[in-house]
Amino acid sequence: MKPSLNLCFFWHMHQPDYRDSDGVMSMPWVFLHAIKDYYEMPWLLSQYKGLKATFNITPPLIEQLHLYGDPLKNDYFLSLWEKEPSTLAHDERAWLIKTCKSTQYETMIRPIAYLSQLYHKEELSDAELIDFEMLFMLAWCGNYLRQENALVKTLFQKGKAFTQADKAHLLQGLCDFVATILPFYAQLQEEGVISLSTTPYNHPILPLLLDMENAKRANAHTTLPDNPMSLREDAVEQVERSIALYKKTFGTTPKGFWPAEGAVDEESVAIYKERGISWIATDEAILFRSLGDDTRANLYKPYVYNDVTIGFRDHGLSDLIGFNYRFKSGHDASEHFIHAMEHIRHTQKNATVFVILDGENAWEFFENNAYDFFTALYGRILQTSWCRTVTMDEVSRLLDPGKLEKLAPGSWIHGNFDTWSGHSEKNRAWEMIYQTRRDVNNHKGEVSDEVKEKVKFHFLASECSDWFWWYGDDHVTEFGLEFDKLFREHLITIYRLMHMQPPSDLFMPIISQKSTGSFLVKPHAHISPVIDGKHSTFFEWIGCGIVDETKLYSTMDRVRGPIDMIYYGHDDQHIFLALEGDIASLKMSHMKLEIIIEETGEHFNFNFPLDTPYEKGGIRFAMDERIELSISKAHFKEYSTVHLRLEILKGSEIIQTMPGYGALFIDMDETYVHNWFV
């Protein structure tokens, strides 16, 4: 049977630029994903002859991968990891352990029994720390290394009682492996197995550099930074530098770009076109806004705007892979995916489906780094005669694409730019860039070409989308202060290069108030999460309210309870709550959670442990990695606003009352339409 559906997988490989003003990477995620994902993803594809895909590799990732030729000089984490534990300062040891413990527990730590045991210890001896460091690094080694690398296999078999010599051998072996990653992509591209693309140099939101008014064009309710200025020269520089680096790395000029965060507008497309780029990709929301029509049948073909081919991602299918299939077996997930594709095939003639998502961060939430999923999915696709995988290079040559008369500005998140502008913290970061640029422009002294080049580099680095991602209250990371410091250091370095005194506010953390004082983030969007007790992605709970009980402990000197964080929100039918903290102790206890509606006096009681989800009378309750529950709004009768109080009890003793400041207020009539975040 002739194939009747084209499937375009597009995997985006990116890490922020972790280099500080001295050029040292301050966090290790490039290295860790290199040994887990960057080689493994194209390798998995290459095992299934006839399958094709597109990979996007960003310039910050390319440049940082090259730095592992000298890891101890260029990676701060590895310089600590390599040391004899007895030589570590107290703060170095604490940060090293914090970083190691940030690894996904259920899928990466728990499967290695001794690593799980060490993970839960409050104090580690020097010998235990060496074992913890080694097992942490082995846990990050992907399936390719575990199957094919003799040293990694030997160290897994050893299991414990590692030595400093073991650390040195493993680090050298892994750095040798990292050096093979980019040549492997080049080889697969030459063989026609993959297409390669790249992103503007420092992964900036190009439309916001060109014109901050694009933020308001995409969301009329947003708030713009004060006194914005066009950074068009930087936008062009970002594109040209990335093209030059790609050519240096792969020996050819790129044909395609994944605009950072799928962020597009008409002017940025013109910049790509002028520099020989023939295709880009972005999200379905941009297509629907450009057409003024959200009929899904319009989605399943490439479009041409200003002579540039554009692929628009199927948001639902992409999110199924990124966020939902980790809860299914590889077989069940692959069958579900093929079934969804078959529906498109039957309803759309000669469809081309774009499945575009992060190619690295999702897999640690799957068992076996998604190996079971990908082997099942790729094998199933090969058996499906009507489905043909294609690269973006091939898509750009398909006949009869759709035509776009205009292109709406926006990104892959909700079709707007709210993730990178609008919130006071995000806007403050932009205002700092603008002020630094104005101060440099007003500088009267002589500046050498070498200094000009360094200044330009730090400006481009400060424009990276990742800094703005972590400002505001829509995304949370325990490394927020580190990201904040990296951003401000770029601007501070510019002033020092120019022999100018940096403004004092550049030395003040932008997120300091949120990180050290504020314990309450109010909801700013409706949510409708799945109640399964799992650590969901930020998308499921994005827009929820957050109560950080740990900050109440410090500000009110309260006795610590087992619950650290409360997440809450509502949709038209339900109120949703999630509780995080020492869930393991609750599972082993005979405590219970009691929820009280102050307006009606109704009580709900849930005993621990809870092995299976509870669902009765409009209540759903699940306990696994965390506690999640939903309460039907029918329980609140005619009340449009309610106050909830939560208690953890052991017998008649109240162990913890939440929130620590009183009662949780929920306005069920709130539509959030006037918020900056939509």
Image (spheres, helix red, strand yellow):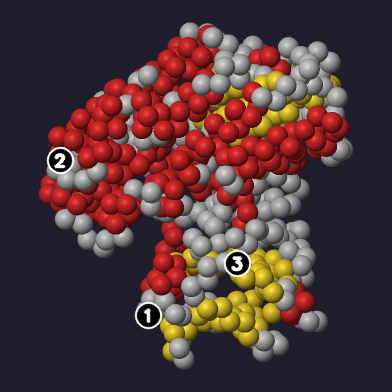
Labelled pair 2, 3 in contact (Cβ < 8 Å): no
Residue 117: where, in percent of width, then height? Answer: 29, 57
Disc marking residue 388: none
Looking at the picture, which amino acid does disc 2 mark?
A: Thr
Residue 181: where, in percent of width, then height? Answer: 41, 21
Q: Give the mark toward the camera: 1 or 2.
A: 2
Label 1 environment density (alpha carbons within 10 Å; few <14, some 14–19, many ≥20):
few
Along the viewing direction, whichever of 364 and 444 lies nearer the viewer: 364
**Residue 622, can we see it?**
yes
Q: Earlier in the sequence, mark 2 or mark 3?
A: 2
Left/right of residue 303 with respect to residue 441 in the rendered view: right
**Residue picked out by circle 1:** 559
Q: Earlier in the sequence, mark 1 or mark 2?
A: 2
**Residue picked out by circle 3:** 613
Q: Residue at x 65, y 83 (%)?
A: 597
**Residue picked out by circle 2:** 163
Residue 561: where, in percent of width, then height? Answer: 41, 76
Residue 364: where, in percent of width, then height? Answer: 47, 43
Q: Give the mark toward the camera: 2 or 3.
A: 3
Q: CA distance from mark 1 to mark 2?
A: 41 Å
Q: CA distance from mark 1 to mark 3?
A: 30 Å
Label 2 environment density (alpha carbons within 10 Å; few <14, some 14–19, many ≥20):
some
Q: CA distance from mark 2 to mark 3?
A: 45 Å
Looking at the picture, which amino acid does disc 1 mark?
A: Val
Q: Give the mark toward the camera: 1 or 3.
A: 3
Occupied quadrant, residue 311 = top right
Occupied quadrant, residue 646 = bottom right
Left/right of residue 348 with respect to residue 264 in the rendered view: right
Does 427 sit above or below residue 645?
A: above
Along the viewing direction, whichever of 543 and 510 lies nearer the viewer: 543
